[in-house]
Image (cartoon, helix red, strand yellow):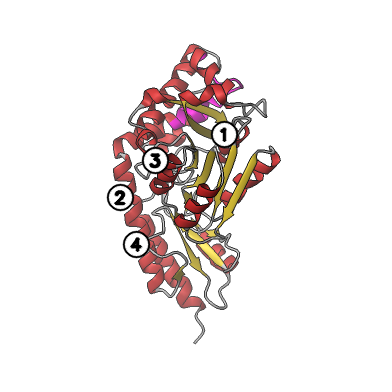
Amino acid sequence: MKQYKLLNPGPACTTQTVKDAMVTVGDVCPREVESGDLMKKVSDDIKTLLTSNTDQYECALLTSSGTGAIEMIVSSLPRTARVLNIINGSYGKRIQEMLDVYKIDNEHIDFDEGSLDLEQIYDILDNSEFTHISVVHCETTTGILNPLRKICMLAEKFNCEILVDAMSSAFAYPIDLYRYGIDYLCCSSNKIVQGMAGLGIVLVRKELLDNLHARSVYLDLKSQVNYFSKTSQMRFTPPVQIINSLSIALDELKEETIKGRYERYEYLNTYIRLKMEDLGFESLINKDENSVIITSFIEPKGFDFDAFHSYLKVHGYVVYPGKVSKYQTFRISNIGNLLKSDIVDFIKYVEKYVIFTTRS
C-alpha cells in the first residue's frame, strides 16, 4: 500500500523503528516469560509517564481500539454508581451510549459541540447526588480542549470519582493522574504515543478496584488488573507484536519528552491554523480553546471536501471529514511522526488546490 502522511486524528504516522518492531519480534508465544516482561515494561512506562505516584495506580492493557478502553471502565463501574456525563461532542455521546446500554444510573449535560459551562455543571452537582463524573479531555469532534483541571476540582469538591477519556491528550499534555486527582483514565496505543493501532490502555486508582462490578467478561477491569498483577499477562491472548512496537514508541516518547512532543505539536498546529486562515479557511474553535492536536475548519461556500481530499491524497496527504452537526467542516490533525517540512509541503498543496479551484 502507498504510504501517506496522515493528518487524521489517529491512527497516526509512526517512525520506521516502531514499524520495524512489529516484524523484528518474530513469532513468539504470548504466554512465555519474555512476553510478560515486555508487557510489564510497557505498563510501567505508561504509569511513569502519566503519574507522579505510580504506586497509587494500576495499568490495564487490552486488545481493542480506544473505544474498548473507555468501555472497560464504564462496564466495570460500581453497582451503586450514579454518573454525570459531560458531553460536547461525539465521544461524550459514545460514553452516554455505553452508560445506557449497561443501564448505569446517570444524567448527562449536553453542550452540543461548544464550550463547557462550568457554573452550570457546578449547579447540577450541587443539586443532585452523583458518585462519578465522566468527561472527554480533548473532543476531536471539533478539536476543543476541555478544562480538565477545573473539572477535577469540581469532582473533588462534590466527592465524585472522575473518569477521563484522554484518547487525544494523554502523552502530549502534561497530565498527572495523582496530582489532578483522576481516578480512571483511558487512552490508546495509536494516537499521541505514536504506536500501532490495536491496544486500549486503562489506568485506575488501586484503592477503587474492590468496588468495581463486572458487567462484561472480556472488559472486566478488576479481573484484568488482578490477573496482570499476579502473572504479568493479559487474561486473553495479547498482540505481542503490537505491544513490542508500543514499547519502542514509549522509548521514543521518553527521549522526546512529553513537553517536547507538546511543543512540536503546538508549533505544527499553529502553523496549520495560521496558513489555512491566510488561505481563507475559518477555524471552528477559537485558538484559546482549541487543542494542539487537531483543528476543525468551516467549509467555504461551494467547497467540495471529497475533491479536496482526493487531490491531497494523490499528493500523499490524508485529511479527515468533519463530524459537527451545525456546520460543514473538515479536520486537520498534526499528531504522529510529523515534521515541519511535512506540514510546509502540505500547505503548499492546499494553496495550489485553492488557486486551481477558485473561480475568476
Among numbered discs 2 and 3, the one appearing first in the sequence = 3
Magenta residues (range) = 231-246
> Relative to 195, is 269 above or below?
below
The disc placed on residue 162 is none
Circle 4 SS class: helix
**What residue appears at the point 41 percent right and 74 percent down from the top-left corner?**
279
Q: Which residue is mark 1?
A: 73
Q: Pointer 2: what residue?
A: 263
Nearer-the-camera pick, 8 or 17: 8
Q: Is residue 266 visible?
A: yes
Q: Amino acid at mark 4?
A: Tyr
Q: Quadrant of residue 270?
A: bottom left
The label number, if any, that marks residue 171 in the structure image: 3
Q: Residues under labels 1 and 3: Cα distance? A: 19 Å
Question: What is the three-letter code of the residue carrying label 2?
Answer: Glu
On screen, 136 above or below 222? Answer: below
The numbered mark at residue 271 is 4
Per the image, label 2 sits on a secondary structure element best described as: helix
Q: How many numbered marks are there?
A: 4
- Is 301 on the left or on the right of 151, as rendered? right
Q: Name the foreground residue: 334 vs 352.
A: 334
N-terminal-most mark, 2 or 4? 2
User: Which residue is at the far bottom?
Assistant: 360
Q: Nearer the viewer, residue 29 or 194?
A: 194
